Amino acid sequence: MMLQIPDILSKAQVAQCRQLMDAADWADGNATSGHQSALAKRNLQLPEGSPVARQIGDLIQDALGANATFFSAALPLKVFPPLFNRYEGGQAFDNHVDNAIRYLRGTGFRVRSDLSATLFLTEPEDYDGGELVVEDTYGQHRVKLPAGHLVLYPATSLHHVTPVTRGARVSSFFWIQSMVRDEGQRALLFELDTRIQQVAEAMGQKDSGVVGLTGVYHNLLRRWADA
Ligand code: NI
């Protein structure tokens, strides 16, 4: 399941992030790559753990924590501290699958990447190219979202970023280990939760059907989740 979540960050928050990022020192993106992706990746990154990366990463993590759609779709157990990349002058990232396990350097913290996320921090009209292209059994999905919007997609997917031929594309990217490892189960829970909210809107939270279905949701989550 691919999901776009609008307005994770407000335009004011995006502007604040961009001000900090545009003044920061960027490094070769291959600092964080495995061997295979080092061959595929041509971009710049904010150094992992740098003060600016931490400051903006905390702001993003707080915003994610407050977003009900993100919680319902990802059912996050652990979120890897957000990283930041920048593509310009024809830079791109060829087709690849993200590493299964991400380690936070110098700590015991590690995340199994069940979901990959890209948070766009540049308005689409400010650059050409730079589309995130995700492949699944239904074909290719091209994603280029307004600044502050997020796309979530299965970390098992082949994906690439097309060359940026005008302007610069700045984004945050990170991985989520979900409480529900199985993608199909996670998608069903998201669908069920979304439908319960719709019915509750029409019938009221105290409707006995809504109460019963909410119980089914939680009992499925109890069955399937590691917490
Ligand atoms: Ni990737």
Image (cartoon, grey):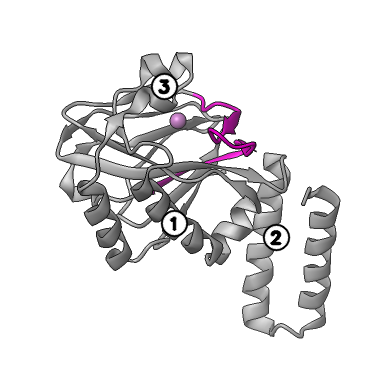
**Callout 3 crowding tier (Cα within 10 Å): few <14, some 14–19, many ≥20:** some
* Frontmost residue, 180 versus 186: 180
Q: Earlier in the sequence, mark 3 or mark 2?
A: 3
Report if the beta carbon of the residue with label 2 is closer than 8 angstroms to ligand 1: no
**Labels 2 & 1 near each other (Cβ < 8 A):** no
Q: Which residues are magenta?
A: 97-119
Q: Closer to us: mark 2 or mark 1?
A: 1
The relative height of residue 4 versus residue 104 in the rendered view (above or below) is below
The relative height of residue 27 versus residue 74 in the rendered view (above or below) is above
- Mark 1 vs mark 3, CA separation in Å: 26 Å
Q: Disc 2 marks which amino acid?
A: Leu
Element type at mark 3: strand
Q: Closer to us: mark 3 or mark 2?
A: 3
State the residue position of label 2: 192
x, y percentage for residue 211?
80, 77
**Callout 2 crowding tier (Cα within 10 Å): few <14, some 14–19, many ≥20:** some
Element type at mark 1: helix
Q: Disc 3 marks which amino acid?
A: Asn
Q: Earlier in the sequence, mark 2 or mark 1?
A: 1
User: Is residue 107 left or right of 43 when viewed as pictured?
Assistant: right
Q: Determine which quarter of the picture holds residue 208.
A: bottom right
Q: Which mark is residue 60?
A: 1
* Residue 114 forms part of the magenta stretch: yes
Identity of the residue drawn at 37% across and 48% down: 51
The relative height of residue 144 versus residue 196 in the rendered view (above or below) is above
User: Is residue 163 left or right of 154 when viewed as pictured?
Assistant: left
x, y percentage for residue 23?
20, 48
- Mark 2 vs mark 1, CA separation in Å: 27 Å
